[in-house]
Image (cartoon, coloured by chain):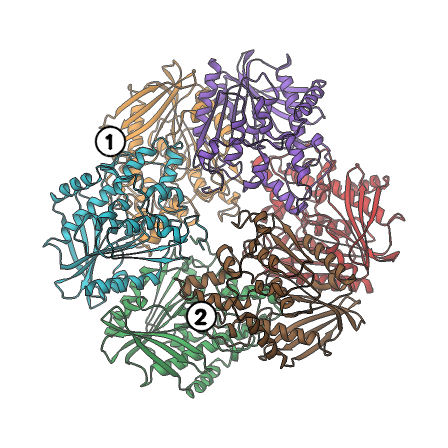
Chain colours: A brown, B red, C purple, D orange, E cyan, F green
Amino acid sequence: MGRKVGDFALDELRKYHPELANKPVDFQDFWDMEKEMIRKFTPEVVVSWRDYAVPSVEVADLTFTSWDDTPLRGLFIKPKGVTECPVIFFFHGYTGSRGLAVDFLKWTTLGVAVISFDVRGQGDSPDYGKYSNGSRIVGWMLNGIHDPKNYYYTNVYRDMLLQLNWIRSSEFPVQPTKLGVMGGSQGGGLALVAAGLDENMDFVASDWPFISHFERALEVALSGPYMEIVNYFKWNDPQYETYEDVMRTLGYIDSVHFCDAITCPTLMGTGLEDAITPPSTVFAAYNHLATTKKEMEVYPQFTHEQNLFHEEKIIAFIAKQMEA
Amino acid sequence: MGRKVGDFALDELRKYHPELANKPVDFQDFWDMEKEMIRKFTPEVVVSWRDYAVPSVEVADLTFTSWDDTPLRGLFIKPKGVTECPVIFFFHGYTGSRGLAVDFLKWTTLGVAVISFDVRGQGDSPDYGKYSNGSRIVGWMLNGIHDPKNYYYTNVYRDMLLQLNWIRSSEFPVQPTKLGVMGGSQGGGLALVAAGLDENMDFVASDWPFISHFERALEVALSGPYMEIVNYFKWNDPQYETYEDVMRTLGYIDSVHFCDAITCPTLMGTGLEDAITPPSTVFAAYNHLATTKKEMEVYPQFTHEQNLFHEEKIIAFIAKQMEA
Amino acid sequence: MGRKVGDFALDELRKYHPELANKPVDFQDFWDMEKEMIRKFTPEVVVSWRDYAVPSVEVADLTFTSWDDTPLRGLFIKPKGVTECPVIFFFHGYTGSRGLAVDFLKWTTLGVAVISFDVRGQGDSPDYGKYSNGSRIVGWMLNGIHDPKNYYYTNVYRDMLLQLNWIRSSEFPVQPTKLGVMGGSQGGGLALVAAGLDENMDFVASDWPFISHFERALEVALSGPYMEIVNYFKWNDPQYETYEDVMRTLGYIDSVHFCDAITCPTLMGTGLEDAITPPSTVFAAYNHLATTKKEMEVYPQFTHEQNLFHEEKIIAFIAKQMEA
Amino acid sequence: MGRKVGDFALDELRKYHPELANKPVDFQDFWDMEKEMIRKFTPEVVVSWRDYAVPSVEVADLTFTSWDDTPLRGLFIKPKGVTECPVIFFFHGYTGSRGLAVDFLKWTTLGVAVISFDVRGQGDSPDYGKYSNGSRIVGWMLNGIHDPKNYYYTNVYRDMLLQLNWIRSSEFPVQPTKLGVMGGSQGGGLALVAAGLDENMDFVASDWPFISHFERALEVALSGPYMEIVNYFKWNDPQYETYEDVMRTLGYIDSVHFCDAITCPTLMGTGLEDAITPPSTVFAAYNHLATTKKEMEVYPQFTHEQNLFHEEKIIAFIAKQMEA
Amino acid sequence: MGRKVGDFALDELRKYHPELANKPVDFQDFWDMEKEMIRKFTPEVVVSWRDYAVPSVEVADLTFTSWDDTPLRGLFIKPKGVTECPVIFFFHGYTGSRGLAVDFLKWTTLGVAVISFDVRGQGDSPDYGKYSNGSRIVGWMLNGIHDPKNYYYTNVYRDMLLQLNWIRSSEFPVQPTKLGVMGGSQGGGLALVAAGLDENMDFVASDWPFISHFERALEVALSGPYMEIVNYFKWNDPQYETYEDVMRTLGYIDSVHFCDAITCPTLMGTGLEDAITPPSTVFAAYNHLATTKKEMEVYPQFTHEQNLFHEEKIIAFIAKQMEA
Amino acid sequence: MGRKVGDFALDELRKYHPELANKPVDFQDFWDMEKEMIRKFTPEVVVSWRDYAVPSVEVADLTFTSWDDTPLRGLFIKPKGVTECPVIFFFHGYTGSRGLAVDFLKWTTLGVAVISFDVRGQGDSPDYGKYSNGSRIVGWMLNGIHDPKNYYYTNVYRDMLLQLNWIRSSEFPVQPTKLGVMGGSQGGGLALVAAGLDENMDFVASDWPFISHFERALEVALSGPYMEIVNYFKWNDPQYETYEDVMRTLGYIDSVHFCDAITCPTLMGTGLEDAITPPSTVFAAYNHLATTKKEMEVYPQFTHEQNLFHEEKIIAFIAKQMEA
């Protein structure tokens, strides 16, 4: 059990609306330029349909050659025979993968197609990025940490922009009648970022997002990938001489900084005993969302773990978006 | 990670076919009489259809008043509009529950209906059994441990027999074109028992079953519910004076003792690092199955944990049964 | 070691006198009616004297058929040959048992008889209660949690009322010249309840009582049986929809709510590092005791554990009551 | 729980009768000379009777000035008014103390007096020994480890010899009608040693003795004071250059080497999950006892912990000795 | 990792300047008298030069017979051939030892000689002290705890005074051109004490000192030797009846009480996650130093562990002192 | 403590000489071709001399642009003023770094220069490799695991070959009179590989080498980087379908496969409680060394941890090589 993670009490969390002091002044320009840059690429995507046990769906393995030639593996699953339908763009958690078809059957039963890619370096997809530094810490969090233009998550967001372009293109195997994003932990953070970058997003389901409000996360997280940065300081920079530098890079990719651009219906969830993505970092994102059609489900005893109760909430949320 | 649980190596496991010295000589008579007894009951079942977010399915909450009046809560989910279809009878793990509808959508997408009940005392269903003993150990494993006729799992199996009668009756909301059983851990053990008790079962998916081969399980398990019995000895009978008595009761409910009556296709799985239901106790069941249409999936590094890779195997197995 | 359990500092504990907002308005009526109801029963008690190694005492095994026919096993030990003497009614801790004769020799050496029963379901005594719910949590804490009239501890307190009636009856093997109650943890809570229910009680020794001040206990406990309720919320009601309902039931059995009826000499003890029955929940009881003849022994470094130093305090306390 | 300590199975334990290769050839001479030496001392003992709550006993605090002037604190408790009675010489466990009077009431109720001393350095008594070495390991095990004539336990056994002389002298507050020794862990080892050194001992109760069969103990113990020696090698002699030297010293004080001189009734106990005094080291002692009036109680699930079930066995054993 | 030790935040630490309420009024007199007493002794020192692999240094093993005849083993290492040079007096940590020559080569490369002794009882040196008490706690912290004149650390400081006299005498193998003290943990505390006792000290390097500000240390430490005192209270004095007495003794040896006499350049370091010598106890010492030539290196993520980054700081600090 | 890692007993370890069944038949050709390829590169090395506190040494920071342009940071430290001297090529452990100058002063005091580089990706140096896969496991072990020609350690060994070429070139800041390699864990494995690849190596000090005898390491390791491969199977390939493929790649880089080419004096060390680089994997390397001038230091109680005792052995070993 995860009692006593040392974060705020629930009533304080509900009104936790921190100033975004770490948001760079050129944040908007930075991402406008990146979008511009990505628009120039046409991804090469190999779509390999394969036999799958469930007759009512069609499944394809994808190889998506991204803007820097990194080949990202993906999975696409759709209701059999449809040519247009709602689409969920799913993002996986840190150390996860694009997933297995069985993961997504609960969504296709709603008549929705699901597209999911490995995040670069993760799953079994490589990362062709050439970062300017290594570190004493295993993991992806420190790759390029001193250079916002060539930081790991900057590259991940570039992949996402190119993937969104493809999804909205005529090359995509179905015509999306709606497009939503979904994920938990890293996937929850990426879902927020996608919805912030794509103004036409239709809905967001973001569970206990990671990559959110680093100023606080580095103070209160007790395990998980935020600790890679904490441990980077311990082992590579024990007296925090590059702290400003690190925070500057993180300012460009913090999912909270994308929240004021999110205007579509959004469902979020958090466990109050979560020491990996502490609840205050989740509420920081939630309370900065521009949309008023938002809901936060709170699970007082949950840590950073699978939560089937919340999956029922998401099913209901998605179903409602389908009706709208 | 669960390295080094102290069980046999894989090649030994594959040929582990222990004598069933603890199977009572009157095992068959015992259960024939129980079936006879249960046949006299007609369960009262309240079926409450409810709204559910997914339009393609129908969901009902059940209250099943069992042979001793214990009201067991259940869940039924079926493809919308069908009146006959294959049915999966699902059993949950120890300390689990009948589950949420979202758990079962991956099966209904195959055109299958799923029926699932709380095991008595578990989920949120009571147990009206009057057992002749208590114990210093929290849990259900010791209830009635000295009396095979009024042991906890004897009563659970009676519930199952009555539930099977209902499923095969005209009262059941759909006509089962096939009937299979499925579950993991306790649910895996119950699936084996159900297939052993019901000679017309069509298929079994039993993941790392609990309630299997107690003689060995009490020696090698390191955590989980087998330890309730081990700890019973520690705190209630420290010098094992009632060991024979306890083993005699367990002999009537050990799922391995039902395996020679299982003749339908069966899929099993085991993690070699599983200290809760150690692999040798799983292979003991597998190697005693009467059926030749059986498959064992082995996961060398897995402990007693969720395994999505195996879920893909189950999906394929079920789909294949649907075709047959 | 148990450092830093997160409870109040000692000077705050000493003045911690919380309002009893969760005490039901009909608390007194509820228990008056229960006493009335129990008065109608005459327990059937089988007293089996047995050989015991120590010549100076006599030991009997008891079977006490309670108000709902639950057969509770008990132990009675008295100085050899006496027909009247002081009596200690002893209550055991959660997951304990009525105990062994050797446990009680330190008290009989004072010329005192000791009577001790298994709490229903615990020790090796059954519980014939038919509760309206089960749960995903092993243990007794959730049995009947939504129904004050049929909650586990309501039934335990009914047993205790009937046992007290028997002890004060002419059927009891000795004539009590004094009657005191004693116990630790669950036993400490039960001792308080017994002294609150029986206005003629002569003394109380309650060590770090459990079942005390649930409002706070559910917030600060880190392990032990209070966590069964916390975990019930996690797994059976993750968003606390039945919180009011649960607290309503607990309001009727919270030992703190019995304290203003305790007017006899009372000795209590607490360890400041106790994460199972945190010190604030113990002081809540102590500070609500009506008696002025009360003493609290504080052990700064002790967790929830055996404390022989405190046993010396209890010996001295009991000896003093014998003189009075 | 202590599962899987890596020691032998029970049937092997029962016949484990290791050769005593580490017993020095001059073992008998060594201790004959020590006895001779100690006989020359007359201890100065201050006996301070004090008030104690229990009227049926008398309690004295002792200060026993030992052969090297070390003042050892002790406790004496006897049935009130008697001048002769059986006496139990009690030895405490490592990091324990002479105990509190309440610890011993269960024995005085049998009409027995109990004498108990702090082991030097332990409890709150000092050790005036001047050892020729220190170590990087906290604890008493390494004091004088290279010198059998001035090793910690050699000095402890000298204290014991002098204490036995006093107990058997006319200075002792009662006349012992019988004399037995008792203790657990370190106390169990000391009880064996006392019975080996004093040929007139009447009975022994030795629970899971420490200081037994070091050759094996250093291989299989996983925690507790044997590990002080293991860790001494790690931190003071990482390549075991003084192994022979250390073993030579331990050969003089290993309690197993005293067992062939024990001819009185002996009760022993062991937990099969004991990683502090592993069961094979206990059986090594038991199987070398010269007496045929011996009993070994085996507790399969017990670790190195308090065991009330065994206390009942001891009560019965002592009572039987009283009769004899 | 050591996150969340519960000590003050960094900005509070920087200004933490607690009143020294536990400093005895006769503190100065006490130590003046001790210095006076020690001045009367001439230590017998055996200096055994030995072969050592590194040609540029000379190494000697020392046996230093201290004021009470305790033979303390030491190590001396100096640049080959010099007869005068700067000298570092090194003190080791609790459960450490005088060290190996390889530990000190980094200092001799600076042209410095290093002298290091086992702290009595530690390393492999004995302690001939006759303390008036033992305890239930393994370790050295409680030896003589009720008697400032015969407390363990009082004796250790006497050794140090005599060692300083020897170092400054003509008997010492080199003529110290400068004398500095150095150490971490216990060694850091001893370095402060040495600099407080010797007014001619030239520099101090004290890493996360132990023996500092006991009032707070006993409250916030979570492991390590401060816990010996905390556990002494638990097991020897559970209700803190001797607390004043213990604190009185500690008042004479608390390194913070020596800090206002330190006027030479001082380098200190602390890890903010240190639960053994919590940062507030380190800042208490630092902020009470009389010298203005002081530096505190702060390592936010470090626990009580080896810190090579800080070793670079010390090298630079020592090099700078060599120049001065 | 690390007791009971489950590896062989010492006498079995001493004769453990496993067949090298996993050594590829073209192993020699593979590395001959790699050497050939690397010979074509001339590294660009930036040598930046910097001020360092210790006057007797000179320190330079290096940037070494490797064969694929990866800029590897390095450290060079030499006795002041010399132009030729023995050189130690030092390799750091997994998650370590090139180190700090203070780490190497103990070697320069011997008149030796030390050169040390970050292993690519580690320390703070990047890895420009484009691997064909990612994984769900954080760390470097899986990078390129399916392709011997583009596996992480293949690239690391290429860096090493180029670094050796540079060290032996006239560009190197000193003329090496001897060249030895040294390191622990990963560094110990790299030292063996370097000595196997460079037939003119003068000596090797390899402590508890990692990257050794993968067939066994994957079976017995319990933590550390071997577990990255074990966990790769769990999460990326749960049924070991690519096992042969993975082992094929590892066959080219297993340090044991380089041992029969090592003919110079070699010192090794191992801790028998090491669960990260288990002792059998270390003895596998040792027993395959071609040289007869080899020594294995065994530390029975040591886990995978710093060992100053062994550093003294290394100092003596290096000093001896200097004389030779």
Q: Nearer the viewer, residue A41 or D289?
A: A41
Identify the mark at residue F122; answer none if there is no mark.
2
User: Do we see residue F16 in this rendering?
Assistant: no
- Image spot of residue C136 (x, y percent): 67, 44
Amino acid found under the numbered disc labelled 1: Trp
Badge 2 density bin: few <14, some 14–19, many ≥20, Cα 10 Å: many
Q: Is mark 2 on a helix, strand or loop?
A: loop
Q: Which quadrant: the C terminus of chain F?
A: bottom left
Query: In the image, is F306 to the left or to the right of B31?
Result: left
- Residue sitting at the far right: B170
Query: How far is the residue under mark 2 from the one under mark 1?
Result: 63 Å
Q: Mark 2 belongs to which subunit? A: F
Q: Nearer the viewer, residue A214 or F126?
A: A214
**2 and 1 marks on the same chain:** no
Badge 1 density bin: few <14, some 14–19, many ≥20, Cα 10 Å: many
Query: In the image, is C10 to the left or to the right of B208?
Result: left
User: What residue is disc 1 on?
Assistant: D67
- Residue sitting at the far bottom: F40
What is the total number of numbered labels drawn onto the structure image? Answer: 2
| Quarter occupied by residue B202 | bottom right
Q: What element carries label 1?
A: loop
In the picture shown, does residue C65 fall above or below B299? Answer: above
- Image spot of residue A299 (x, y percent): 63, 50
User: Do we see residue B141 in this rendering?
Assistant: yes
Amino acid found under the numbered disc labelled 2: Gln
Q: Which of A53 and D3 is in front in this view?
A: A53
